[in-house]
Image (tube, coloured by chain):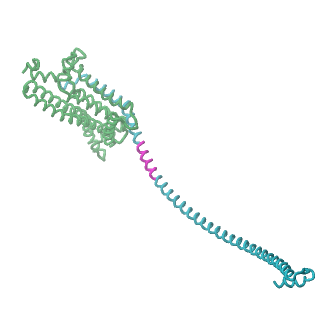
Chain colours: A cyan, B green
Amino acid sequence: MGALAINATLIGEVIAFAILIALTLKFVWPPLMNAIEERQRKIAEGLEAADRAHRELAEADTRAADEVRKARAEAASIIERANQQAAQIVDKARIDALAVAAREKATAQADIENMAHRARAELRAQVASLAVEGASKILGREIDAGTHKALLDDLVAGI
Amino acid sequence: MSAESGGESFTEYIQHHLTFWNAPLTHAGGLASVHIDTLIMSCVLGGIFFVWFWWFARRATSGVPGKGQAFVELALEFVDGQVKDAWHGSRKFLGPMALTIFFWVFVMSLMDVLPVDGIPTAAEATGAKYFRPVPTADVNVTFAMSLSVLVLTIFFGFRAKGVRHYFRDVVSAPFTAKNVFMKVLLAPFNILMFVIEMITQPISLALRLFGNIFAGDLLFMLVAGLMTHFLSLWYPLGILGYAVWSIFEMLIIMIQAFIFMYLSVTYIAMAQQHH
């Protein structure tokens, strides 16, 4: 039996214990600890990056909102300016058109007057000749245009 | 009764299970002999522990760990946390040492819950007449570890304080005094306390583990022996008893492995504290 028998086994076990600790110390602990610490660092970095991204996103959001507001204001001012310009252009066009129309109207009136004047003069002349012809037919003889010039002129002026 | 176990009486059965595979190194034997079974089992189990952890340590990744690596890391972090609680200095040595102690003691004691006849029967088939498969039920193993821890305690004490300061603490602590006369008066008691500490630490460490595992082992033997020798009609009852005790023994094994690890770390940490 000898449950409490201490013997040379003890020395063997001390050596085994020492070897086992040495192996663990060299081949087990450092790589696993490095992996754990590396992962902890990675997770910490990841969390920080997420935080930073979150902050940046919020900043970008406010910046974008700003930009949109500015763009809207600018667009509004551009539209207003455009409207003003359009109104100006329309006004100017109307004034120009009115001027052109007035000018055209004056020319046309002058033409009409001219033509009417001429027509009247022609009519007078024709009336004079018709009157002479008519009179000569009535009188049966030729009225000498030269001798009755004064009379005819008088007639024409009377028409 | 004896017909059931091949001519072995109950007492013989127990005695057979309690006998080491003893190999004398000299003709005298006695101290100069080794327990082959203890050596084989402890080395094989230590090897299993090492290969298991080394397998995952070798391919350890800082990315997403596999299940095997996750378990190994969990064990490592648990041990590391315990060491950190007890000692605030470098854990370059104490960490691996604690891990080795915990898992080596655990796997060695775990042989307890294997069927008590299993390994001895297998060993008998290869020619070993006696074979005790639980190394921690051998005082040689537990004392080998506790004495190693004692050596480490003194070594780390020297390293942390320097030899002179170390011995000054031996003389002047834990009982301290202001004047020289009282110091001289208290010195013998301080030395006595130190000596007692140095003796009780390894003995309590070794015997606690040995006692727990040996008692568990013995109970398994008794249950198995009673089952085959007296209670053959109550075989199911024996199996039930065996199962219940296995579950309880698992708890004991874990607690003992933890205590051995924790006390070892604590002793070494205490030796480095300045008074």
- Give the vertical position of A69 relative to A121 (above or below): above
Q: In this picture, is B101 found above or below B34?
A: below
A84, B65: nearer the viewer? A84
Residue A2 is left or right of residue B179, and the answer is left
In the picture, the quarter occupied by the C terminus of chain B is top left
Residue A85 in picture, x, y percent from top left: 63, 66
Q: Nearer the viewer, residue B8 or A2?
A: B8
Q: Is residue B205 above or below residue A158?
A: above
Q: Is residue B156 visible?
A: no
Please state, as top left, top right, bottom left or bottom right, where the N terminus of chain B lies in the image. top left
Spot occupied by residue A71 in the image (x, y as percentages of width and height): 54, 60
Q: Residue at x 75, y 73 (%)?
A: A107
Q: Position of residue A128 (x, y in %)?
A: 84, 80
Q: Is residue A43 magenta?
A: yes
| Quarter assignment of residue B180 | top left
Side of A151 relative to A4 (left or right): right
Question: Which quadrant of the figure has residue A81?
Answer: bottom right
Q: Which residues are magenta?
A: A41-55
Q: Tell me what residue is drawn at x 13 percent, y 24 percent.
A: B14
**Residue B100: percent from left, percent from top:** 31, 32
Closer-to-camera residue (A75/B226): A75
Quadrant of the rendered image containing residue B56: top left
Query: Residue B51 colored magenta?
Result: no
